[in-house]
Each structure stands twice: as structure tokens, then as C-alpha cells.
Amino acid sequence: MSDSIKRKVQETFSKNKESYFTSATHNNQTDLDLITEWLKPKSEWNVLDIATGGGHVARQLSPAVQTVFATDLTKEMLANTASHLKGFPNIHYVAADAEELPFIEETFDAVTCRIAPHHFPEPALFIKEV
């Protein structure tokens, strides 16, 4: 069941990738500023942004940290986001399942995930991965 849900998510997000980048909800600067305020990022940090979608959090944090790894289950979403965020060379894009991340433990100084966990079939696995 989990795999079929993830395939449906990939299909849906592949078709709607541009709308997520331009979405007023996802571009809410007040929310994005709060992330920076609460996180208090440091310039030497490596940050993981899970289910980056349009890359709003990755873009927000990029100027304040060393690197941001922006991950998403949908490759087409990542490609679209990367094309829009070419001016942020410290953002790296990785196709990854939030419930089965391809990184070794303690790689990142901070992990973010905004407006996405409701799409995950097994949120408990996501929490365990983080």
C-alpha cells in the first residue's frame, strides 16, 4: 500500500511541480522568516530539507548555511526547483524518500520539513529517519 501511495504522490507532484513553486502558501515569507528565526542557522551548518517541493525552505536557509541538501520523492519536482534556484549554488538536490533517507547518521546539523508530512504514508517512519 505504501508504494502505491508514493507512486500516486509522484504522479501528482510531477504534473503540478510549477504550481508548488509559485504557490502563495508555500511562498509565505512570514513563515519562512520564522524558520530562520527559530532555527538560528550557523554559517558552517549542513542542512537537510526533506520534501523540499518548490525549495522554499532550502532557498530561505541557503544564504545562512554552508550547504543545503534539498530532497524530494519526485525527481521532476526537484528538477523544476533546481531550474528556478540556479542562483543558489550551495543547494544540492537529491531524490529521496522521507521514510528511507539515503544519508548516514549525524550528517546534518539541522533537518527541516515544512508542509509535507501529511503526504507521507507512514509518518512514524519519517520521524524515525529524522
Image: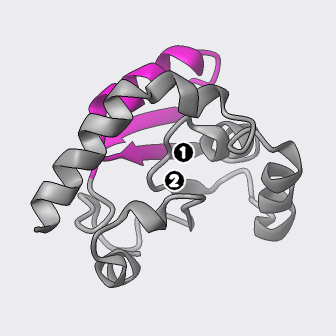
Q: Does 91 lie within the magenta span? A: yes
Verify whether residue 71 appears in magenta: yes
Q: Position of residue 14 (x, y in %)?
A: 33, 29
Which residue shows up at 76% across the image and 67% down it? 39
Q: Are marks 2 and 1 in contact (CB under 8 Å)?
A: yes
Label 2 belongs to which residue?
49
Answer with left or right where residue 24 lies relative to residue 37: left
User: Can you tell which quarter of the image residue 95 is in?
Assistant: top left
In this picture, which residue range is highlighted in magenta? 69-96
* Sequence-earlier tag: 2 or 1: 2
**Left or right: residue 80 compared with residue 110:** left
> Camera-side residue: 98 or 1?
1
- In this rendering, is residue 90 above or below 103? above
* Three-letter code for the amino acid on which mark 2 is drawn: Asp
Residue at 79% over, 50% down? 32
Q: Picture quarter containing residue 47?
A: bottom right
Q: Is residue 43 shown above or below 12?
A: below
* Residue position marked by numbered label 1 in the rendering: 68
Report helix, strand or loop for mark 2: strand
- For marks 2 and 1, give the CA distance: 7 Å
Residue nearest the viewer, comparing 92 with 21: 21
On-image quarter of the N terminus = bottom left
Residue 17 in the image: above or below residue 122 = above
Q: Position of residue 104 (x, y in %)?
A: 28, 67
Picture disc at residue 1: none
Q: The C terminus is located in which quarter?
A: bottom left
The answer to whether residue 90 is seen in the rendering is no
